[in-house]
């Protein structure tokens, strides 16, 4: 399976929610929040930032650590790496179906409330969880490090959660009515345990639109726009075809273009890059009727963010990344690793009419060096930055194609 280029979030079908609700209701009354031991009220934790996604170490049933993405776009705890299940001592697992964003069949999963989760000094018992029988998301390939799952609502709903992206520091504390917050207050609504805010955006030719978007810091893009008044979202005049990633049940095709303006509260961005997935692949799916799209990590990482789920507020303050240009990949190459933590980088796919295609690079080519610098000393973050490093910049790629050593000259091009 090819890895993600941009992460698309799971959407659970009604049967899963119903089964889980019945399962919890028939079980003993358990607390549904993380707690500190003793008199502790707050905690500080360093995280790893990969492609603007937050990766934290957690323990499941006192086993670990496991790498989980901290993700406001998911409700249940989601285990994407089923290989860790045997080590958790789970006895009662219920089968369920998940519908994903993309083409293909529904996905088999198992649900349980037998897991405890510890993050930093906080712990929760019997957290509702879903275990995917197969890792359809390919997160480890996409990020270049081993990823075991995603943690969302139950963590954010337990604390005031502050994320400092430049320092890669996570602070979380018990709710306190006397707490003073830094940044501009942006109200949100919790819908299906996920935060939604209103943003104003302008697409050339269609005017200014007030939209409701999911705040999804587990999605790699800046913003994805899926529907408008029951139809596909209006496109900018200039767009390019793009593979927007893999959902749980297949690839997601669409367009990429630039918005004239995008405003969150008093903050305004110009020429932000937006993804426009094919309507039938995403927006027409069940349970997406309450939103126009989702706001992702490429935009959220330009702020230091604080989430106050209890009072329905998001606080935003500019950080050093606020004026970072919105740039799309300029090579047309989608790169992945076959095994997490392995310094071998391969070409998953190539955008049509892109510099990568024009240079003669082919799918499954292994990239050994870029401008004579060995990729063994690089990670996916660095390669991603290099392929966005400047319109017209020249690169010499050293490739391994089925045992044959090849050199390909490529000139980067800003395609959007």
Image (cartoon, grey):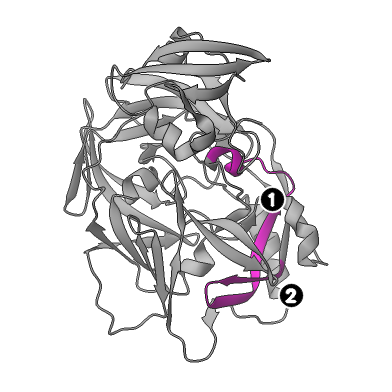
Disc 2 packing (10 Å; few <14; some 14–19; many ≥20): few
Position of residue 90 relative to residue 379, above or below, is below
131 lies above or below 370: below
Furthest residue toward right: 91
- Label 2 sits on a secondary structure element that is loop
Q: Looking at this view, is 403 or 293 the one in front? A: 403
400 to the left or right of 292: right
Where does the image place residue 53, in percent across and percent down from the top left? 45, 49
Write the residue at 38% across / 34% down.
Answer: 385
**Disc number lying in front (1 or 2):** 1
Asked whether, in this view, residue 220 is left or right of residue 182, the answer is right
Residue 387, position in %: x, y? 39, 27
State the residue position of label 1: 81
Question: In this rendering, does residue 163 appear at all?
Answer: yes
Pick whichever of labels 1 and 2 is earlier in the sequence.
Answer: 2
Residue sticking out furthest to the bottom: 39
Q: Residue at x 54, y 23 (%)?
A: 367
Residue 128 part of the magenta-drawn span: yes
Q: Quadrant of the C terminus?
A: top left
- Say which residue label 2 marks: 26
- Image coords of residue 81 (percent x, y): 69, 50
Mark 1, other Cα within 10 Å: few <14 / some 14–19 / many ≥20: many
At a point 69% along the width and 40% down the height, the residue shown is: 106
Q: Which residues are magenta?
A: 113-142
Q: Quadrant of the N terminus?
A: top right
Q: Is residue 239 magenta?
A: no
- Nearer to the camera, 293 or 135: 135
Disc number for residue 347: none
The answer to whether residue 68 is above or below residue 288 is below
């Amino acid at each position: 399976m090819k890895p993600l280029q941009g992460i698309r979030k799971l959407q659970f079908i009604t049967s899963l929610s119903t089964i889980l609700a019945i399962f919890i209701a028939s079980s003993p009354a358990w607390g549904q929040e993380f707690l500190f031991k003793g008199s502790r009220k707050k905690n500080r934790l360093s995280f790893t930032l990969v492609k603007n996604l937050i990766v934290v170490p957690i323990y499941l049933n006192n086993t670990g650590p496991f790498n989980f993405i901290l993700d406001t776009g998911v409700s249940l705890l989601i285990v994407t790496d089923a290989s860790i299940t045997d080590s958790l001592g789970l006895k009662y697992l219920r089968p369920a179906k998940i519908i994903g964003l993309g083409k293909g069949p529904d996905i088999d999963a198992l649900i349980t409330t037998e897991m405890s989760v510890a993050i930093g000094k906080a712990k929760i018992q019997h957290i509702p969880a879903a275990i995917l029988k197969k890792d359809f998301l390919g997160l480890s390939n996409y990020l270049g490090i081993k990823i075991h799952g995603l943690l969302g609502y139950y963590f954010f709903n337990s604390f005031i959660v502050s994320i400092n992206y430049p320092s890669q520091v996570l602070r979380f504390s018990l709710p306190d009515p006397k707490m003073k917050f830094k940044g501009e207050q942006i109200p949100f609504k919790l819908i299906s345990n996920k935060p939604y805010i209103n943003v104003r955006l302008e697409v050339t030719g269609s005017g200014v639109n007030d939209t409701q978007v999911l705040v999804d810091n587990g999605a790699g893009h800046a913003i994805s726009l899926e529907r408008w008044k029951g139809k596909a979202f209006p496109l900018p005049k200039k767009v390019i075809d793009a593979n927007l990633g893999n959902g749980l049940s297949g690839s997601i095709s669409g367009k990429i273009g630039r918005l004239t303006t995008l405003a969150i509260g008093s903050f305004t961005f110009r020429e932000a890059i937006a993804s426009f997935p094919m309507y039938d692949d995403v927006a027409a799916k069940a349970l997406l009727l309450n939103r126009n799209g989702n706001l992702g990590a490429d935009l959220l990482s330009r702020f230091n963010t604080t989430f106050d789920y209890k009072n329905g507020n998001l606080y935003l303050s500019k950080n050093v990344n606020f004026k970072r240009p919105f740039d799309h990949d300029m090579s047309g190459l989608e790169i992945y690793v076959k095994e997490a933590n392995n310094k071998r980088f391969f070409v998953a796919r190539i955008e049509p009419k892109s510099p990568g295609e024009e240079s003669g690079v082919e799918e499954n080519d292994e990239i050994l060096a870029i401008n004579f610098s060995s990729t063994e000393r690089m990670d996916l973050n660095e390669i991603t930055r290099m392929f966005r490093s400047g319109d017209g910049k020249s690169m010499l790629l050293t490739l391994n194609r089925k045992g044959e050593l090849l050199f390909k000259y490529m000139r980067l091009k800003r395609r959007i």
